[in-house]
Amino acid sequence: VRNWIKGGLIDWCISRDGPYFGFTFPDRAGKFFYVWLDAPLGYAAASTEWAKENGSSFEELWRSADKTRIEHIIGKDIVYFHTLFWPAMLEFAGTPYRVPDHVYVHGFIGVSGEKMSKSRGTGISPLRYLDIGMNPEWLRYYIAAKLNASVEDVDFNPDDFIARVNSDLVGKYVNIASRAAGFIAKHFDGNLYAFPEEEIDPQFSWAVAIASADLILDAYENREFGKVIREVMRLADVANQRYDQAQPWALAKDPAKRSELHRACTEAIDAFFVLTVYLAPILPATAARVARELFGMHHDLNFEDRKRRPTRIQPFRHLMSRVDEKQFDALFASPPAVSATHAPHTPQTHAEHQQHLAQKDSSVTDPISIDDFTKLDLRVAKIVDAEQVEGADKLLKLTLDIGSETRTVFAGIKSAYPPEALKGRLTVMVANLAPRKMRFGVSEGMVLAASGEGPGIFLVAPDAGAVPGMQVK
């Protein structure tokens, strides 16, 4: 903007000849106001309407710089109008008009590295997103995770979207409450443990979360939403790790350790509450449900609520489902608008999109013979148990039923799947792989999973009807 001004501003034509749209000049036949002259007046009109509904006036609202702020949140393609034309009009219109306090600018949203284009089918319609039943809070979370104070473009990548929502939002954040709430309801009638002051440890996951309040608040104030998400996910990791270390599932089997069970589960629930407060501006509907349905609160959460210590919870209800890849097939299959100069175009489904990305990977490896392939004994396996591996960043410990026996396999899929989500699932394993001694135990095989250039790990699963022990040929 400074460069535009330094370069010397020229006269700006505020009229357009008909045929045009919008408002006509009252004393000039066939002349219309240029749309960017009248369009920003919609902000003033919206302010007027709000003022009427809330016992105020437009003049009071816009004049009270000590009580109100005027902030614009725009895309980078309209910087010229919002930083030159509109402020100039406001400045010289006089009282009660005043220029914006801030103009915040975002970059564009692309899809898998490509600029959005209706004709190429790379655009994503928010209305289509809602029409097919995709959760708006997923999208709010995903975009927030990529936003910062700089004018940077955001890339919408389906695989990254699935990984962030399923692994982080559901697998880390929601997972805290889903794991601990059941023990509180079953063993303590919903009542949370009241920690005496002398028992409070700064290492408690909720105490660690409270200690991040200033960082979270500063990040919000400076529009560093990605920093908020990263810190909340770090705190969720702390809460889940503390919970795993306490092993409530083992404590619940020993009546003598009832108090330890109560404390461990309450610590997790308290941490979940603090994280919900932190995420409330990004996930307002989810935060409202948590406050109302789990904690029995009937007000919108505010930042000061982080200091509250809930005393009881209500029975846990399912909070958020995982993203299903098939939803992306429906999303990308939405046909774009057809113009007079472009023929209809059917966008790629998510599967076709994945195939397009896979072609960017390295070429297929050197050929092998059928004899080489038959050396592999691939078996359908049922995951009967899945556990966190203490001290391992990527591993989960899987107990697999392959029909004739059970095997223990350590799989590097922790980032993609929480343990609870794996139990009962079918997958495919290499059954005749030599056992491998690891620091955490002996791994007796290998499960098959797919991955590509982008983020995301995807377990290979057999079709319906397959049973443990079947050989994959």
Image (cartoon, helix red, strand yellow):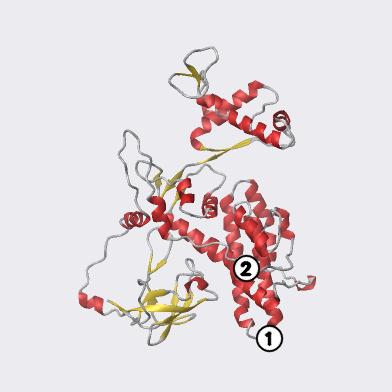
Residue 51: quadrant of the picture: top right
Q: Earlier in the sequence, mark 1 or mark 2?
A: 1
Taking the view exactly as shown, the residue that stands out farthest to the right is 197
Q: Position of residue 60 (x, y in %)?
A: 73, 30
Q: Secondary structure beneath disc 2?
A: loop
Tell me which residue sits at (47%, 60%) in the image: 323
The Cα–Cα distance between marks 1 and 2, rounded to whole angstroms, is: 23 Å
Q: Which residue is mark 2?
A: 316
Q: Secondary structure beneath disc 1?
A: helix
Q: Which residue is mark 1?
A: 255
Give neighbour class at mark 2: few <14, some 14-19, many 20+ (Cα, 10 Å): some
Q: Position of residue 357 (x, y in %)?
A: 34, 55
135 shown above or below 309: above
Give the residue type at disc 1.
Pro
Give the residue type at disc 2.
Phe
Q: Position of residue 57 (x, y in %)?
A: 72, 31
77 shown above or below 461: above
Report the side of 437 relative to 85 (left or right).
left
User: Can the viewer see residue 53 in this picture?
Assistant: yes
Circle count: 2
Front-most of 209 and 116?
116
Tell me which residue sits at (47%, 24%) in the image: 21
Tell me which residue sits at (48%, 46%) in the image: 127
